Image: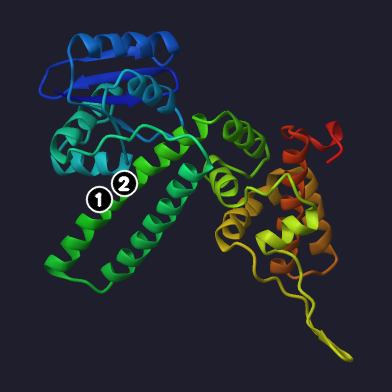
Amino acid sequence: MIVGVDLSKAHLDVARHEQAGTTRYANTEAGIEAFVQDLQAAPSRLVVAEATGGYEIALVRALQRADIPIAVVNPRQVRDLARARGKLAKTDAIDAKAIALFGAVMRPKPLPAPAPGREALAGLVARRRQLIDMMTAEKNRREHAEGVIREWIDENLAALKSQLANVDAAIALALEADAELTRRRDILVSVPGIATLTAAVIIAELPELGHIGAKQAAALVGVAPINRDSGQYRGERHIGGGRPSVRCALYMATLSAVRHEPTIKAFHHRLRQAGKKPRIALIAAERKLVSLINTLLERNQTWKPPQQHGC
């Protein structure tokens, strides 16, 4: 039996493939436990849930503890299959049935049990980057493809998107499986602009952060200005080296931080008012963000508004 679960902050709406009706549980510890017990009484081959940005994690953990297979899938794929079958209406119950149908037709692979430790997390983060690169390459090929070749590319993109949803869920679980990683994640995501996946990249690929000085941290990320001077020549300073994946993740975080983190927002505004080019000001803001999170990790404290701490 394939079971589909539509998740929201408050509820789990559950449908069993080719069975009428749905069942609703509270998305709480007690509600999830009741759902698990019902599944154990009538075993299923697979439970399928959509990636919801975090609401699914408690359910996944509970099902894995009970040795019940759980797959996390991309919501867009579920919608596409439902539309292809002429199911255009949308309610929680209908969504649960659509997810169960998707599970029965596509048979997504269940998530593996989370492995604790930074090495396991680093492998997942690297795999996510590979999937993004493969999807980008396939999308570029699709532009010039026709007929059956375009169909094959679409099939491959659907498979890659499905695996990406699983990897994202596995990353969230890996961060939960290790107390130290959980604490580092909580510190990082407390900073406006840094989301869970950005935190995962930082934790996996810049483990030195919090144990080194601000200048060394900037150099490791690759946002420290490099002198280009020789004799009387004084060249323009550029960034270089460092760890590109971390730098790219933090660059995207900086785009949000310059709008929502007060200190970095004010710093970026001063640079722009002083005539600094947009890219130069943004890189300087990224360097300041690196310094901020390095200090927070060193002090083992979460971010608070500037007037409440000395960072």
Q: Which mark is residue 298?
A: none
Q: How many marks?
A: 2
Q: Position of residue 239 (x, y in %)?
A: 70, 71
The answer to whether residue 247 is left or right of residue 302 is left
Circle 2 crowding by C-alpha within 10 Å: few under 14, some 14–19, many from 20? many
Task: Reply above or below: 176 against 93.
Answer: below
Tell me the residue at 80%/52% (across/down). 213
**How far across and down, in percent of the image, does residue 165 sit?**
36, 42
Point out the residue furthest to the left here. 18
Q: CA distance from mark 2 to mark 1?
A: 6 Å
Determine the residue located farthest toward the bottom in the rendered image.
232
Quick one: 273 or 176, which is closer to the camera?
Answer: 176
Q: Residue at x 48, y 34 (%)?
A: 116
Q: Are marks 2 and 1 in contact (CB under 8 Å)?
A: yes
Counting from the top left corner in percent of width and height, residue 64 is at 34, 24
Image mark for residue 163: 2
Q: Quick one: quadrant of the C terminus? A: top right
Residue at disc 1, secondary structure: helix
CA neighbours of label 1 inside 10 A, class few (<14), some (14 to 19), many (20+): some
Q: Residue at x 19, y 42 (%)?
A: 81
Q: Position of residue 238 (x, y in %)?
A: 72, 74
Residue underneath mark 1: 159
Instruction: Please say if 197 is above or below 230.
Output: above
> On the rendered structure, is 300 left or right of 2?
right
Q: Quadrant of residue 271?
A: bottom right
